[in-house]
Amino acid sequence: MSAPTILDITPAPIDLNQLQAAITTDADGAVVLFTGTVRGVSRGATGSNITTKLEYEAYREMALAKLGQVADEMRAKFELIHGIALVQRTGEMQVGEPTVAVAVSAGHRGDGAFEAARYGIDRLKQIVPVWKKEWKPDGSSWIEGDYTPEPKDVPAKGLPARAQ
């Protein structure tokens, strides 16, 4: 059985039905799909603190390589999973639009698909070079992550200037 892997950095809307179909094999009875969406109201947000849209940028070549690393890690940790999709959007997105999708297929719900999807989104947020700008009524700002890359996360050539 071939285990499909979909990795993409794209400005196009994510077709969740197509993504599920692309990673589901004849041996799969379970598919877990996680989507991150633009939320307008964060914890405690009011007035000018409400998000009106998000804008994402990525270092595409490195981001695709890091998505591949995440998929490899998922397969190593969760040996019973089959298909994997890791898709990150770039560009501007409005409240309610999907910004990222992680999909995992497996033979049964207990074969690690839930855990693999959670690992996939957490790891994607840690090491994939994607930057987010949050737009609010009173202006915009780039959002900083809180993860410090480990040696295994940084390619031999180092990080691009924007990621440092």
Image (tube, grey):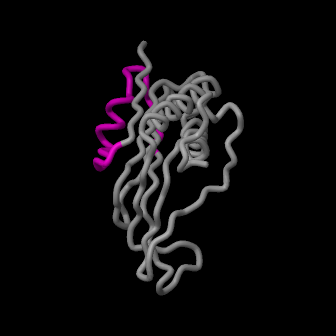
Point out residue 40 in the picture as x, y percentages from the top left corner.
44, 72
Q: Which of 7 and 106 is in front in this view?
A: 7
Q: Which residue is drawn at 59% across and 79% down?
A: 44
Taking the magenta stretch, the answer to whether it contains residue 81 is no
Q: Is residue 164 above or below residue 2?
A: below
Q: In this view, does 151 lie to the left or right of 19?
A: right
Q: In this view, does 118 lie above or below 46?
A: above
Q: Which residue lies furthest to the top in this view?
A: 1
Point out residue 15 in the picture as x, y percentages from the top left corner.
29, 45
Q: Residue at x 61, y 49 (%)?
A: 164
**Numbered range of the magenta stretch:** 10-33
Q: Which residue lies furthest to the bottom in this view?
A: 47
Point out residue 78 in the picture as x, y percentages from the top left corner.
61, 27
Q: Is residue 145 visible?
A: yes
Q: Residue at x 57, y 23 (%)?
A: 80
Q: Nearer the viewer, residue 119 or 81?
A: 119
Tell me the quadrant of the picture where the N terminus can be found.
top left
Taking the magenta stretch, the answer to whether it contains residue 15 is yes
Q: In this view, does 46 lie to the left or right of 88?
A: right
Q: In this view, does 38 lie above or below 41?
A: above
Point out residue 57 in the picture as x, y percentages from the top left corner.
42, 52
Q: Is residue 2 left or right of residue 76?
A: left
Q: Can residue 30 be seen in this view?
A: no
Count of picture labels:
0
